[in-house]
Image (cartoon, grey):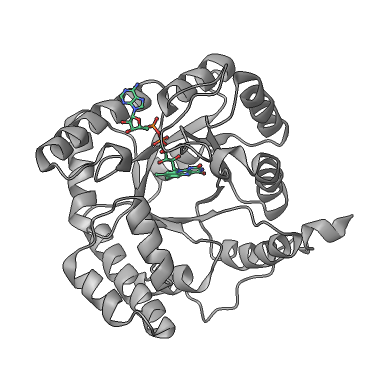
Amino acid sequence: IDKINQKVAAGQHFFSFEFFPPKTEEGVDALWERMERMVAHGPIFCDITWGAGGSTANATLDLAGKMQNMVNIETMMHLTCTNMPAESLDTALTKLRESGLENILALRGDPPKGHDRFVTVEGGFSCALDLVKYIRKTHGDYFGICVAGYPEAHPETLTDDQAANEKAYTDSLSYLKAKVDAGGQLIITQLFYDCDRFLKFVKDCRAVDIQCPILPGIMPIMTYGGFKRMTGFCKVKVPQEINDTVEANKDNEEAIKAYGVDLGAKMCKYLLANGTPGLHMYSLNMEKSALAILERVGFIDNSKVPRPMPWGFVPMHSCG
Ligand code: FAD
């Protein structure tokens, strides 16, 4: 089985790691080393993000190919519509196929720089649904396609009006169903800190006949600033107790990290105990918190030195 959605559907108690393309060559080298150690723990797949507005298109394509072929991990590449006319999408999809990749996370993307609303580029697409349709139209069943899900509705549809938010949530389920019907085979969610919201979301998805696997996006709290930025940007509800603990430890970096691991492990155990098949870790290219959480959950043993990579790993850009 090569398609990630098939592996996930057949799996139980697995985990996966998301990475993003670093900005510098030193960053890329550091990422390979980290990825080597993380992949040695046996994730079911790894994915690599597509920088905002397509800013990392070449880097993402390059990294995705090397993850698949050199790190030897089943890789899913994110792809967004932002600033991507159909020809650019065609080029990216062809390159992916040439690199032997079979998995895509199809997204709309955030508004291009300088805009607060999404702008459709000429000759491009305005939503993930149309991108999914396009990939299916141009490449048939070649790619396994994953789509994004939002347990609290998409942030741009949320306001201060509770009734309107309820409607936005219901609408977002129909829209998600359309993405799945058009060819989406796996759902990964936006980060959340209220596990019951995620479990309700899964139940609501099943109720509207969305049957594909749904993976929770787990973002360990690593820094005060990062946590505030991400929860604010994504308009994620933070339970009072979590907020109070983070605020109380705001000036203590170590305490925040330790709390992030405690909380992450508690959340993951609760999700798994309530029927969630596996965990998708937003690693933010860092290994310690994600691995510590997985160890607490009982998925990995950090005391065992990760097995060395069989192919004699060399940082990529020093290969010439
Ligand atoms: P869509 O599913 O298209 O939805 C966007 C909004 O438009 C929703 O509110 C939806 O309800 C509404 N909408 C659009 N079309 C319709 C329609 N036809 N009918 C009804 N409603 C419609 N961003 C990046 O730039 N790079 C990444 O690598 C990246 N990775 C991500 C990974 C995950 C798991 C998640 C959850 C998000 C990621 N994002 C990434 C962020 C994502 O691009 C943004 O959240 C973006 O604003 C929406 O993308 P989407 O694919 O969810 O859009």
Say whether residue 44 is left or right of residue 24: left
Of residues 66 and 229, the one nearer the viewer is 229
Instruction: Determine which quarter of the picture holds residue 103.
Output: top right
The quadrant of the rendering that contains the C terminus is bottom right
Question: Residue at coordinates 55% horizontally, 29% vertically from top-left?
Answer: 143
The answer to whether residue 15 shows anywhere in this view is: yes
Question: Which quadrant of the render holds ligand 1?
Answer: top left
- Number of numbered markers: 0
Say whether residue 133 is left or right of residue 58: left
* Residue 274 percent location from the top left of the image: 21, 56
Instruction: Determine which quarter of the picture holds residue 71.
Output: bottom right
* Residue 242 percent location from the top left of the image: 24, 70
* Residue 287 percent location from the top left of the image: 53, 69
Of residues 65 and 226, the one nearer the viewer is 226
Question: Residue at coordinates 27% horizontally, 70% vertically from top-left?
Answer: 266
Say whether residue 20 is left or right of residue 155: right
Of residues 11 and 87, the one nearer the viewer is 87
* Residue 308 percent location from the top left of the image: 69, 69
Of residues 37 and 237, the one nearer the viewer is 237
Question: Residue at coordinates 41% horizontally, 77% vertically from top-left?
Answer: 257
Farthest-out residue, left: 163
Question: Residue at coordinates 73% horizontally, 52% vertically from top-left?
Answer: 70
The answer to whether residue 300 shows anywhere in this view is: no
Above or below: residue 27 compared with residue 152? below
Farthest-out residue, right: 320
Above or below: residue 37 compared with residue 163? below
